[in-house]
Image: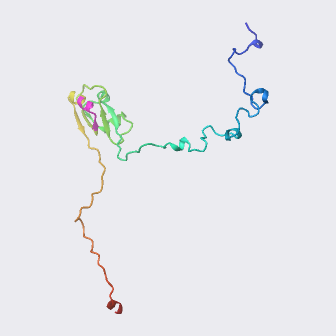
Amino acid sequence: MSMIHELRPAKGSTKRRRRVARGIGSGMGKTATRGTKGQKARRQISPWFEGGQTPIHRRLPVKKGFRNINHKEFAIVNVVDLDKHFDGEVTPEAIARLGLTPGMKDGLKVLGVGETKKKLTVHAHHFSATAKVKIEAAGGTCVVIPTPGKTTPKKKVKGDGPAPAPATKTKKTKTAEKD
């Protein structure tokens, strides 16, 4: 058994601290391992400084692409969840009441993960191809609820509404000025 005063770290496991600018005998004197001349020798500069050229964080774009303003995000539910929780009719309101989706968002989409043995009438805004096949194979039906579309104002067609009054030019004549 060794005594506490005999404990030493394993050979090669520790390294001596580098002491710079302590004379030429240390091997790290004079320029203190900074080399000769230049900005790096004279002052402390940040490691990400690129010498004055436009830095990488400014050369690269912040974001790529864009967010489509017409993008629709649907709440999703799988066929296996419908089979587990429903008998007969399935509506988005019933799915929301059970808490199968966190929120309805822009509508409900049924995906085809899992199997169903029950005859279900499913009302949803969208169905994946596999979900539709699985529901109909079990004898059920898929009812598509129309999603509210984007309403845009109608373009004016020529001939709609009153015609604008024609522009008339009035010419000043010498006789008009005398009157």
Q: How is the image coloured?
A: rainbow
Name of the residue lying farthest toward the front: 36
Relative to 132, is 61 on the left or the right? right
Q: Which percent across, then down, holds residue 17?
A: 72, 25
Q: Which percent across, then down, holds residue 88?
A: 24, 31
At x 23%, y 35%, the residue is 142
Answer whether residue 38 is magenta in the image.
no
Q: Name the dominant secondary structure of the magenta segment.
A: helix
**Above or below, 151 relative to 79:** below
Closer to the camera, 49 or 146? 49
In the rendered image, the quadrant that contains the C terminus is bottom left
The answer to whether any part of residue 24 appears in the image is yes
Q: Which percent across, then down, holds residue 110?
A: 30, 34
The answer to whether any part of residue 138 appears in the image is no
Name of the residue lying farthest toward the left: 139
**Above or below, 60 relative to 86:** below
Q: In which quarter of the image is residue 6?
A: top right
Name of the residue lying farthest toward the bottom: 178
In the rendered image, the quadrant that contains the N terminus is top right
Relative to 34, is 79 on the left or the right? left
Name of the residue lying farthest toward the top: 1
At x 56%, y 42%, the residue is 55
At x 37%, y 47%, the residue is 69
Number of numbered discs on residues = 0
Q: Which percent across, then down, holds residue 90?
A: 27, 35
Closer to the camera, 85 or 34? 34
Q: In which quarter of the image is residue 112?
A: top left
**Above or below, 37 relative to 80:** below
Region of the chain picked out in magenta, as a range: 126-133
Answer whether residue 130 is magenta in the image.
yes
